[in-house]
């Protein structure tokens, strides 16, 4: 007996000694709470925790563009950590996403904590270290009770590249003393800021679209776990009081009562702790749950209780004096966050039974009892479905392809009417009856119900319109023979080829053209339909002839190796057409390779620049010279033929504007987007004007003056709601196409543009109005009634010929967040086909 007691004594002595080495952030980091922690120091701190505690386990799940590790840390009891895989598969089995189930361990609630999706909101990562410490701290008996039935998955920094960009800057400009005054440079972040990732994307808008490598790797892991609670930790303007749930309206109609109830309980629990400390806070303001690609909504539509937590701090640097006269420090910010996040874990642990029941019901009950109007979605066969199915795969949404013909009746996304249609082989079939039933409906329902128009983000994202495919929503489940994939026949390339034909019908077409240009292979594009035997060449299609490329060694093998990623390419054996459109005729124009310059720097919209950069660098893999706009004088414009002006304010001198104008006249091409249009609006020699005539301008000014007179009698309380009548937070607008113009090639019969601001221009004179809004246009999402009247017969995308060059006006941004697939093709048209 004495030996047993002595053995236990030795064990607990060892355990106590082991635990005593677990250091708090303040013990491990000398400037914790006073200065931003370098990312490598954050990793070092967590390494110390994993080495010294049996309550925490690390998993690397990926890398950023700048090769920084992406890590999560599993925190629970040693017993739970020993059975992590069983707990994971049990969780998935309960919602029909795994066939593996074991009784070795009981049900556990899974709480995922995400910090610092925005790099300059650094108090999130700082607080993550305190949260982790308090969960593993051996002297904190309370947290150990929570962990008995809880698995915490803690991601201390979703955006290490942005965090490091901001942190390096703040460290570089910091002195010994803090400077709470607003005019100090540590409160004036430099362009493009640390908010964004390497490609200047806002990762908090990327959860559903998964364009960025950080998101792709994180969601892959998220979908392997499917937590019941997800917390997204943010900061906002430094004068703002803390925000925690309940969230603001609009709340999507698919959100369940158990999710709302947990928000309410959580709000009460957190407010009790804030009240005790006299900390200021607010709930149910600003941060809604609607747009599906946030860190709160995406988990919510996947059955979890998703939430945003916001601490004032953006622009605060190390310390700042707020408008109430008190100083806000890093220590304050991280303490508020840590208190809140730990309360989330505590509340989840106490509500584990209700959370698990609600989550499982959400993921299983609505497979057949659909929350929306429709049970099946059908997308007509189209090459653009290649990209749509990739998106579905990333989100774990199941689909198949029709393997038979069948008549059906459904809602036509483009006409907004229900009518009969035919399902044909290779049409894409997406059924709601699947584990991610609700997420499927959120992404594919034609019209999302918006119960409050004061939304924080875009209000429409209908996938068939974004991808430019013909789609139908059907109320009943369709029983039709299906197959898992479309068989793609291999192209038999003969020993001698007259020409290769590459259809221009999705982003892959542009990727192929990018590679052909970079390999100095001459390419032609069809201006009108041409027929060669059994091959019909649509406008925009690419032609690579042997005659244009006599110096290409082993022409057939070289070209086929480049274009094989475009599986629908064909071989043409003769240049003689059946409809007088021979390959050597004027119908097939040679395409010059773009030599591109893209402006960056102060005045240029950060994320708008980022979307163009990402498109060129990652989607196309095409070279671009990026120059800060204040270095304009150093540019040799004659070395380039294409200039891209992303949205922003460009303060060019009169001489610089004249130089640009002469460059265009001599054959240059400018693609101007959104705010960059102001450089040309109303200027002599350019077609861009807000009004088509003086009479139209006078009428608009009179209408504005009348509104000002009426506004004298309006109350102050509803001022914000009245303002939205002239706004578009983000809606889909129907556009007419001039299908004969190269900028419209491959887009389809109608283009649906994602419009994110109220900028509008009447149809231009002496220019090609390629894409424009018709009278009585169809729209999706919220459009203020005042601006809706003004959008009739306005241009969205136009081409202005000036001498030998072109000016392409993009009123809307077709590359917005790089998820509007038909917009990516439109921009590719402007870049490659318009010359």
Image (cartoon, rainbow, N blue to C red):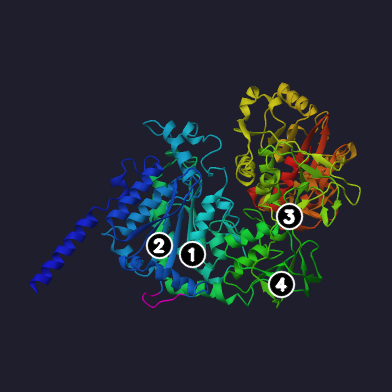
* Chain-order first, disc 2 or disc 4: 2
Q: Residue at x 86, y 50 (%)?
A: 530
Of circles 2 and 1, the one toward us is 1
Q: CA distance from mark 2 to mark 1?
A: 14 Å
Which residue carries the number 2 mark?
152
Query: Residue 814 in the image: x percent, y percent?
Result: 70, 47
| Rendered view: 777 above or below 605 | below
Which residue carries the number 3 mark?
732
Q: What label does residue 166 carry, if any?
A: none
Which residue carries the number 4 mark?
403
Could you tell whether 201 is left or right of 167 in the image?
A: right
Query: Residue 335 in the image: x percent, y percent?
Result: 39, 50
Question: Helix or strand or loop: what does disc 2 sit on?
Answer: strand
**C-beta proximity under 8 Å, tags 2 and 1:** no
Bin the neighbour count of mark 2 within 10 Å (Cα to Cα): few under 14, some 14-19, many 20 and up.
many
Could you tell whether 81 is left or right of 115 in the image?
A: left
* Chain-order first, disc 1 or disc 4: 1
**C-beta proximity under 8 Å, tags 2 and 4:** no
Foreground: 809 or 748?
A: 748
Q: Where is residue 408, by image quadrant?
A: bottom right
101 inside magenta stretch: yes
Bin the neighbour count of mark 3 within 10 Å (Cα to Cα): few under 14, some 14-19, many 20 and up.
many
Q: Quadrant of the N terminus?
A: bottom left
Of all residues, the one furthest to the left in this rendering is 2
Magenta span of residues: 100-106
| Rendered view: 664 above or below 16 | above
Which residue carries the number 1 mark?
224
Q: CA distance from mark 3 to mark 2?
A: 39 Å
Could you tell whether 833 is left or right of 281 in the image?
A: right
Bin the neighbour count of mark 4 within 10 Å (Cα to Cα): few under 14, some 14-19, many 20 and up.
some
């Amino acid at each position: 007996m004495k030996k047993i007691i002595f053995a236990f004594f030795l064990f607990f002595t060892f355990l106590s000694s082991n635990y005593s080495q677990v250091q708090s952030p303040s013990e491990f980091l000398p400037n914790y709470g006073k200065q931003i922690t370098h990312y490598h120091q954050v990793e070092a701190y967590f390494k110390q925790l994993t080495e010294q505690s049996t309550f925490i386990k690390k998993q690397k799940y990926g890398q950023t563009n700048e090769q920084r590790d992406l890590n999560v840390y599993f925190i629970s009891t040693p017993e739970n950590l020993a059975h992590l895989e069983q707990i994971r598969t049990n969780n998935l089995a309960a919602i029909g996403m795994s066939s593996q189930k074991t009784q070795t361990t009981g049900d556990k609630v899974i709480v995922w904590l995400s910090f610092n999706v925005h790099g300059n909101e650094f108090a999130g990562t700082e607080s993550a270290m305190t949260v982790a410490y308090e969960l593993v701290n051996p002297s904190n008996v309370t947290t150990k009770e929570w962990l008995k039935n809880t698995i915490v998955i803690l991601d201390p920094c979703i955006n290490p590249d942005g965090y490091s960009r901001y942190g390096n800057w703040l460290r570089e400009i910091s002195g010994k003393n803090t400077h709470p005054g607003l005019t100090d440079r540590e409160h004036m972040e430099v362009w493009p800021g640390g908010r964004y990732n390497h490609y200047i994307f806002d990762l908090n808008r990327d959860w559903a679209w998964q364009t960025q490598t950080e998101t792709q790797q994180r969601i892959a892991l998220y979908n392997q776990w499917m937590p019941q609670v997800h917390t997204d930790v943010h900061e906002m303007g430094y004068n703002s009081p803390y925000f925690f749930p309940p969230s603001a309206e609009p709340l999507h109609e698919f959100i369940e009562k158990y999710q709302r109830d947990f928000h309410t309980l959580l709000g009460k629990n957190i407010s009790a702790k804030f009240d005790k400390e006299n900390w200021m806070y607010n709930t149910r303001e600003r941060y809604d749950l609607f747009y599906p690609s946030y860190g709160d909504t995406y988990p919510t539509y996947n059955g979890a209780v998703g939430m945003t937590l916001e601490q004032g701090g953006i622009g605060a640097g190390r310390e700042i004096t707020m408008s109430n006269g008190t100083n806000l420090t890093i220590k304050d910010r991280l303490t508020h966050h840590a208190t809140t996040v730990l309360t989330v874990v505590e509340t989840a642990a106490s509500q584990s039974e209700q959370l698990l029941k609600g989550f499982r019901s959400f993921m299983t009950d609505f497979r057949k009892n659909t929350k929306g109007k429709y049970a099946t979605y059908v997308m007509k066969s189209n090459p653009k479905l290649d990209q749509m199915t990739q998106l579905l795969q990333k989100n774990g949404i199941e689909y198949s392809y029709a393997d038979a013909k069948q008549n059906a009746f459904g809602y036509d996304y483009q006409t907004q009417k229900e009518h009969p249609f035919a399902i044909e082989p290779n049409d894409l079939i997406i059924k709601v009856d699947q584990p991610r039933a609700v997420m499927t409906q959120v992404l594919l329902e034609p019209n999302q119900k918006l119960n409050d128009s004061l939304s924080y983000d875009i209000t429409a994202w209908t996938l068939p319109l974004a991808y430019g495919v013909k789609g139908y929503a059907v109320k009943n489940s369709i029983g039709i023979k299906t197959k898992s994939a479309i068989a793609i026949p291999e192209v038999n390339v003969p020993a001698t080829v007259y020409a290769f034909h590459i259809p221009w019908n999705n982003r892959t077409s542009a990727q192929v053209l990018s590679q052909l240009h970079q390999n100095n292979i001459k390419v032609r594009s069809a201006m009108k339909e041409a027929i060669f035997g059994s091959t019909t060449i649509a406008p925009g299609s690419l032609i690579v002839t042997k005659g244009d490329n006599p110096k290409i060694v082993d022409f057939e093998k070289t070209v086929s190796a480049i274009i094989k990623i475009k599986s629908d390419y064909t071989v043409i054996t003769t240049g003689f057409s059946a409809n007088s459109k021979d390959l050597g005729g004027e119908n097939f124009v040679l395409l010059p390779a773009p030599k591109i310059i893209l402006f960056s720097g102060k005045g240029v919209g950060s994320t708008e620049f980022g979307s163009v950069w990402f498109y060129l660098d990652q989607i196309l893999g095409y070279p671009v010279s990026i120059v800060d706009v204040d270095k304009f004088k150093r540019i040799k414009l004659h070395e380039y033929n294409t200039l891209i002006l992303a949205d922003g304010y460009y303060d060019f001198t009169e001489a610089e504007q004249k130089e640009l104008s002469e460059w265009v006249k001599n054959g240059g091409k400018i693609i101007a987007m959104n705010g960059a249009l102001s450089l040309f609006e109303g200027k002599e020699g350019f077609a861009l004007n807000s009004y088509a005539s003086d009479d139209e301008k006078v009428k608009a000014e009179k209408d504005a003056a009348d509104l000002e007179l009426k506004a004298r009698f309006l109350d102050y309380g509803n001022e914000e709601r009245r303002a939205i009548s002239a706004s578009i937070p983000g809606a889909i607008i129907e556009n007419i196409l001039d299908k004969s113009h190269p900028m419209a090639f491959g887009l389809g019969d109608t283009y649906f543009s994602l419009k994110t601001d109220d900028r509008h221009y009447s149809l231009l004179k002496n220019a090609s109005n390629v894409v424009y809004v018709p009278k009585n246009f169809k729209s999706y999402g919220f459009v203020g009634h005042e601006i809706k009247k003004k959008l009739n017969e306005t241009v969205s995308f136009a081409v202005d010929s000036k001498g030998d060059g072109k000016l392409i006006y993009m009123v809307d941004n077709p590359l917005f967040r790089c998820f509007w697939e038909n917009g990516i093709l439109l921009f590719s048209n402007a870049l490659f086909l318009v010359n």
